[in-house]
Amino acid sequence: MSEGETYLAQTLHTTAGADAYDTYAKALLADKQILAWILQYTVREFRNMSISDITSCIGDDITVGTMPIDPGLTNLGRIRQTCTEDNVPGEGTIFFDVRFSAYPGKTGLKLLINLETQKSSTLRDLHYHLENRIIFYLSRMISAQKNTEFYHSDYDGLKKVRSIWICMNRKKNGDFIEEICLVRNTLEGGQKDSRTLDLMQGVIINIRVGENMPPSPCALISMLEVLFSRRSAAEKKSILETKYGMVMTVELEGRLNTMCNFSECIIEMGIEEGLEKGREQGLKQGKLNCGRQNVLDLLEDLGEIPDDIHTRITEETDSQLLRRWLKAAARATSFDAFRTILNMAPAGIGQLL
């Protein structure tokens, strides 16, 4: 048995199903080489550094949730088994997906960084504005430094914090990166002091998870889309090595194998409904979800989809009817016109189309 197989054997039994896929996806993102790519494109302090130099700036205090993980065999992917829980009396408890420290260059600067993954970044899916959650996480990373990174009133001892969020987007043009930061502006008086304050920075990386997407012009997004694609582990390894210059360490290869094995067993679009009911029902649910999403994607060209239409589509369980709605959505010139189709009997829709 090889070292890679030993790692896989250790990790396969830890969790199962959707939780396992999510957990090992985060472990894969926590590899130092992948973190270096993310930092180069999202954190200003690393923008002009090479990937290899950034990798050496990442500390060995990388933590992934509360998951038990092999401590690592090289300095390219080391993960410690420590807790990412942040518990402040009276403020509740939150768990960060991935946390680590980074030290850009020889400046002596220390950055505290948090990496999160989200299935969506839209208000409709989350039921809250993601920007608000990011600000909350950044604030907790700041307040948690009291009596750890600084003491008493030495507020200049605060370390800079960065919260990076990787969000899934099904739109073909959904590949972009956004930044959230503090800005200082002079409102009155002659002093001109408009500048960005770099103590806190939030970043949203929007990647696409649909099939047959053209490569993103952004190398980071393109690389992440390869990681989360439905390609085989062997194909992913080849792309990461040849296109992105990554070294296939035991840790990186093991995490990649583990995630891909789970991915092959779970029908992505029907993951939540299909896990308990088996592969056959998972396939059926996956087709339904895909059919609903196709209709919604076409309707988005008309603008923001009204809640009644969105609810009707997402609750529909007849795949034949969804196919007819898809044709109607392609021809619809307004939401009112499409709403008329929704209220028609299936036979009537067939005659109309």
Image (cartoon, rainbow, N blue to C red):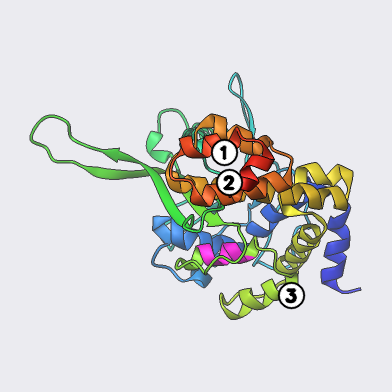
Secondary structure under the numbered disc 1 in the rendered image: helix
Q: Nearer the viewer, residue 284 or 190?
A: 284
Q: Which residue does the numbered mark 1 point to in the structure image?
A: 341
Residue that label 2 marks: 352
Q: Name the residue under label 3.
A: 234
**Is residue 15 rendered to the left or right of residue 156?**
right
Query: For the point 40% across and 58% down, which residue is it?
Result: 45
Instruction: Report helix, strand or loop for mark 3.
Output: helix
Q: Which residue is drawn at 73% across and 51% down?
A: 287
Q: Is residue 5 magenta?
A: no
Q: What stretch is highlighted in magenta?
A: 221-226
Label 2 – label 1 distance at C-alpha: 9 Å
User: Residue 247 in the image: x percent, y percent?
Assistant: 65, 75
Q: Distance between the residues labelled 3 and 2?
A: 48 Å
Local secondary structure at mark 2: helix
Dot 2 alpha-carbon crowd within 10 angstroms: few under 14, some 14 to 19, many 20 or more: few
Q: Where is residue 82 in the image (x, y as percent from the top left)?
A: 71, 45
